[in-house]
Image (spheres, helix red, strand yellow):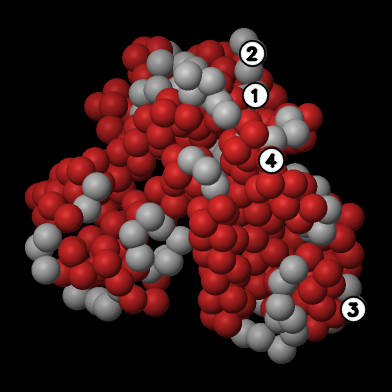
Amino acid sequence: MSVNREKYICLSAMIRSREASMLSREKALRMVDAASFDEAAKLLTDCGYEDMSGKTTPEINHILALFKEKRINEAASLCPDSETVDLFRLKYDYHNAKVLIKSEAMGETPDRLLSGAGRLSAERISGYYRDGQLVMLPRPLAHAITQAREILARTGNPQAADFVLDRAYYTEALELAGRLDCPWVTGYVQLLIDGANLISAVRADRLGKDDSFLDEVITDGGSVSKGAIIAADGAASVAELFAAGGPLRDAAGEVLNTEGESITALEMAVDNAKVAYLKSASLISSGPEVVVAYLAAMENEVTAVRMILTCTLAGVSGDVIKERLRDLYA
């Protein structure tokens, strides 16, 4: 069944209008070069953000979290297909699951770290978890939480628990994309999986991890199969699988052309490849592609804003901030 694009006309028009005020790279660089933190923060008001001048780092993080939640929940209320926005809300369900599991293990209160941008409110997922009512959660999420808790209890390794939740998230996201019957959206989710797999495989190789570790961290469903990645002989061989073509061609080149153990350049190249893919939706007048591209770009923008403002507050030099700045959608 093909996408009914007429249903998306009004929402797409609203998004195109809002895209015009998104943070551009030029304005981001102006923020970095601003004479003061307050001046940098005030530049954001033209992009729809509240004035964050005079705010502390915790206050900035809280304001940006609410901004992101508002934009995602607004799109959800207007979107004709729930799966389109659930692709984004899904991530925060799994984020909340990680927070709840780790907080329980450490005897801490999770409230301040929970997100309200998920399919389930922070209060609901926290309540179901606390009361042992995982059956009330979506089945894939409940199953992943059960597995992650068991692994953490058995191994004491929170990273291993995260691997379970990450794989479950990508698997469910791919299923949601499939229900939309929109190749571009499916391609975007596959790009997310490919990017995570490429980074994980390179990091594992540089840490000297074996195939059993790769089996835990690599997710199936990307354009390069899990089996092919595990069978590859080292980071360079993995990179060659992605260098053959597709959105991550340049990112794979970072692995092939860069020596040393730092993967910062690779992570940046993967992020930039995602933005380049999102920009390909600019030629589509209406449809789920417009919604997905905007929400992904908005999340990327919030990450950039947080980095610039918090680094400026911390006294990080402008040159260093510019080196860390990823590509932007606008």
Q: Report the amino acid beneath label 3.
A: Ala
Q: CA distance from mark 4 to mark 3?
A: 42 Å
**Residue at 34 percent of width and 52 percent of height:** 94
Determine whether the residue tagged by mark 4 lies in a helix, strand or loop: helix
Q: CA distance from mark 2 to mark 3?
A: 43 Å
Q: Report the amino acid beneath label 1.
A: Pro
| In the rendered image, the vertical position of residue 46 relative to residue 9, given as above or below | below
Q: Report the amino acid beneath label 4.
A: Ile
Q: Which residue is mark 3?
A: 35
Mark earlier in primary sequence (2, 3)? 3
Which label was assigned to residue 9? 4
Tell me residue 75's x, y (percent): 57, 54
Q: CA distance from mark 4 to mark 2?
A: 33 Å
Determine whether the residue tagged by mark 2 lies in a helix, strand or loop: loop
For marks 4 and 3, give the one nearer the viewer.
4
Number of numbered discs overlaid on the protein picture: 4
Determine whether the residue tagged by mark 1 lies in a helix, strand or loop: loop
Q: Which residue is mark 2?
A: 245
**Circles 4, 1 touching at the beta carbon (< 8 Å):** no
Q: Which residue is mark 1?
A: 247
Which label was assigned to residue 274? none
Q: CA distance from mark 4 to mark 1?
A: 28 Å
For disc 2, the neighbor class at 10 Å (few under 14, some 14 to 19, many from 20) is: few
For marks 4 and 2, give the one nearer the viewer.
4
Question: In terms of image quadrants, where is residue 64?
Answer: bottom right
Determine whether the residue tagged by mark 3 lies in a helix, strand or loop: loop
Mark earlier in primary sequence (4, 1)? 4
Tell me residue 203's x, y (percent): 46, 36
